Amino acid sequence: MGEVILALRRSLITLGCGRVWFYMLMPALLALIVMVGLSAFLLERLISGFVEQPPMSWIAAWGAFWLAKLLAALGGWLLILSASYLIALLLTAIVVLPLLLKHLAAVDYPELARMGSDSLVASTWNSLWAAVLFIAGWLLTLPLWLVPGLGLLLPFFWMAWLNRRTFAFDALAVHATDDEWRELRRQQAMPLLVLGLCMALLAHVPFMGLLAPSLAALAYVHFCLEALHRLRQGAVVEVIENSEGRA
């Protein structure tokens, strides 16, 4: 997973640029507003509802009401966090990522030719469709929360999947052809998901989690542009070798 570590390291270096922080603070402020609002109006209702549902209701019936309420509070918090993260992620994908991409492509990857289609409609549709699938996945896998431990793991998985599904496409839309995108998705399937998981874990860190969507966008731009750069270098080497073989 050296590519993931490289992308994270380059992201930390990029954070030294003041312009990047200007881009990244917008989704963070929106996530904070959404989180505070949902917590104030919905958290207690969510806790009460979760306590009445298995397995929390079973735990309460066994006499450990404090544990049932604790687990219900954790579930309510994860749901609110996921909702605020989703809204911030959509803003990041549609508005912030193109700005980060333009800046990083000019500063760190100037040699990388733009061979894709810079389509705002396609990127927006990809982000919205990913959000719909994310919500559907959440709802369809709710029964699996009855399995011990999955109630904690599933939110991380769905956030990781959402990061990969949204940011990988948007980071490559301008520079990669359709064939290159399919090849990178095949070659880098697991690292792309691992990077998404790293960002999902970061989303659950107090205060730092507010920046998670922007940091995810930044890391995916670095990862995807570097992966595309290596893919094209390999293609050049292959063409040269084939030419020498024919000669």
Image: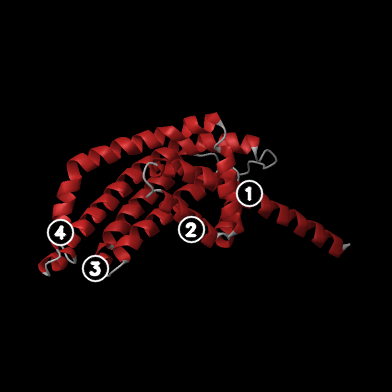
- Residue designated by label 1: 226
- The percent coordinates of residue 178 (x first, y second) are 57, 52
- Residue designated by label 3: 146
Residue type at mark 2 is: Leu
Q: Residue reaching furthest right? A: 247
Observer able to see residue 162: no
Where residue 51 is drawn, which disc sits there? 4
Comes first in the chain, label 3 or label 4: 4
Residue type at mark 4 is: Val
- Please state, as top left, top right, bottom left or bottom right, where the C terminus lies in the image: bottom right
Instruction: Kindly check if marks 3 and 4 are in contact, taking CB atoms under 8 A apart as contact.
Output: no
Q: Quadrant of residue 246?
A: bottom right
Q: Residue at x 28, y 69 (%)?
A: 148
Q: CA distance from mark 3 to mark 1?
A: 41 Å
Observer able to see residue 180: yes
Look at the numbered disc 2 and give the secondary structure of its residue. Answer: helix
Q: Is residue 53 left or right of residue 128?
A: left
Name the front one of labels 4 and 2: 4
Look at the numbered disc 1 and give the secondary structure of its residue. Answer: helix
- Residue designated by label 2: 193
